[in-house]
Image: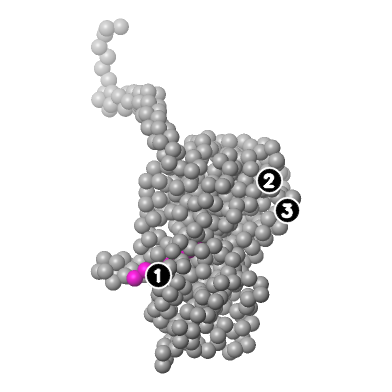
Amino acid sequence: MTQVVEVPLWFFILIVVFATVTFASHFLFPSVRWYFRRRLERAVAKLNTRLARPIEPFKLARRTDMIQRLIYDPQVTEAIVEDARKRGEREDVAFERARQYAREIVPSFSAFAYFGFGIRAARLLANMLYDVKTGSGNTETLKRIPEDATVVFIMNHRSNMDYVLVTYLAARSSALSYAVGEWARVWPLSRLIKSMGAYFIRRKSRGALYRRVLARYVQMATAGGVTQAIFPEGGLSLDGQLMPPKMGLLAYVVSEWTPDTRDVAFVPVAINYDRVLEDRVLAKAAKTGQRRFGVRISVLTGFIVTKLWATVTGRFHKFGQAGVVFGEPLMLSAQKDPQNIEALADDLLHRIGQQMPVLGVPLVATVLLQAGAAQTEDQIKTAAASWTKGTKSQPLEGEKEAFDAMVEGALKQMESRELIEKQEGSWSMNPAETDLIRYYANSLANCHSADLAVNLEHSARAKS
């Protein structure tokens, strides 16, 4: 037992390495993980005291545990067996395919990434690009929602800035969970987005197994009280109008709901801009009928570099206003037929249209399209004020005190972009930019009272 054993140096080093790895994996790593886990739990508990809706345990669960829970769910297991039968494969092959889908979908939420980095970045970007305006009743709207209900924000999709704006404005309420498309599955963007609590979806996937895995994740998140954000239109509006709803994610939320489970509060969110960053790309896509926008990375990089340089040199001017209005929540338990998803989607989109923020550029575009002729600044202000009286949207913060300034700012911005022209003291539309002017006017097509509403498309054709 006390004899000296000689071994080669390489073998001794190998023994030490294996012993170190064994010690670390069995003693050191679990202790370190436990230490940081405890610190995270204390930090989240402190954070929850400041949030109107605390972060639910479901969102903080370990990603590996959520993946296991998802793929062993009875409904997913049935879908695996059926998928294997249809493909003529072994069930373990279909099981691995379901595991791959679950890994794609399930996020790895980090409270530090979301509240430490994400919210600050969203606030900085939103306020750098826009003068952000919120509905005067936004805060009270969220306060009226029962604390034990799952909140689902239902939003119109005008721009990719929608993610940034609503994340920033909902920061005092809770952490949002978005569904993002395949455009975001690029490293390292994908890691950041997953850490922010977003989950990826394959928009073109028609496989029953994939849809079942996605549906069960959404249903588990809803049952777990995770605050979510859904774009029912399924994509960016090409012409500025609200598009017909797609039932996918909304159907997943509703289909498994029963009166004895956690209630769901749908909050319609109307978003509008004085300038949509992608407006020309979208207007062109509407004309060609192609949803493949063909944005070149060189053009996007050039745009970002140009704006950053303008900011550094003090020559950057904001893109006008961005407005976000929260409509009256719609409780799922209050619906006569909660499983009538089409009626629910139509009602939510109708509420979004009615609450659309009335901003300067869309309002001036509406006035010029309806007039069909050159207008002086005073005529535009008078017509804009008259038109606004017929809208149903709640006023934005500070709107009444700054109406004239809003119209004047819109005229300057539209002139700088050559959307309108000034001749002999009157403003008229640039004929080459009629499509873009109509794009902005279309955003207000649903927020006006029925007796004053004008079909802008018909009006523009009749006067052309």
| Distance CA(mark 1)–CA(mark 2) | 41 Å
- Farthest residue in the front direction? 401
Decide if residue 365 is on the left or right side of residue 219: left
**Residue found at x 39% / y 55%:** 123
Decide if residue 383 is on the left or right side of residue 2: right
**In magenta stretch: residue 320:** yes
| Distance CA(mark 2)–CA(mark 3) | 13 Å
Say which element carries label 3.
loop
**Local crowd at mark 3 within 10 Å, few (<14), some, or many (≥20)?**
few
Q: Which residues are magenta?
A: 317-324
Q: Which mark is residue 72?
A: none
Instruction: Name the residue beneath numbered marker 3.
Output: 340
Instruction: Name the residue beneath numbered marker 2.
Output: 333
344 or 366: nearer the viewer = 366
Quadrant of residue 327 within the rendered picture: bottom right
Mark with earlier residue (2, 3): 2
274 or 309: nearer the viewer = 274
Asked whether disc 2 touches disc 3, contact meaning CB atoms under 8 Å apart, the reply is: no
Amino acid type of the residue tagged 1 in the rendering: Phe
Say which element carries label 2.
helix
| Distance CA(mark 1)–CA(mark 3) | 40 Å
Q: Position of residue 6 (x, y in %)?
A: 26, 17
**In magenta stretch: residue 217:** no
Instruction: Name the residue beneath numbered marker 1.
Output: 319
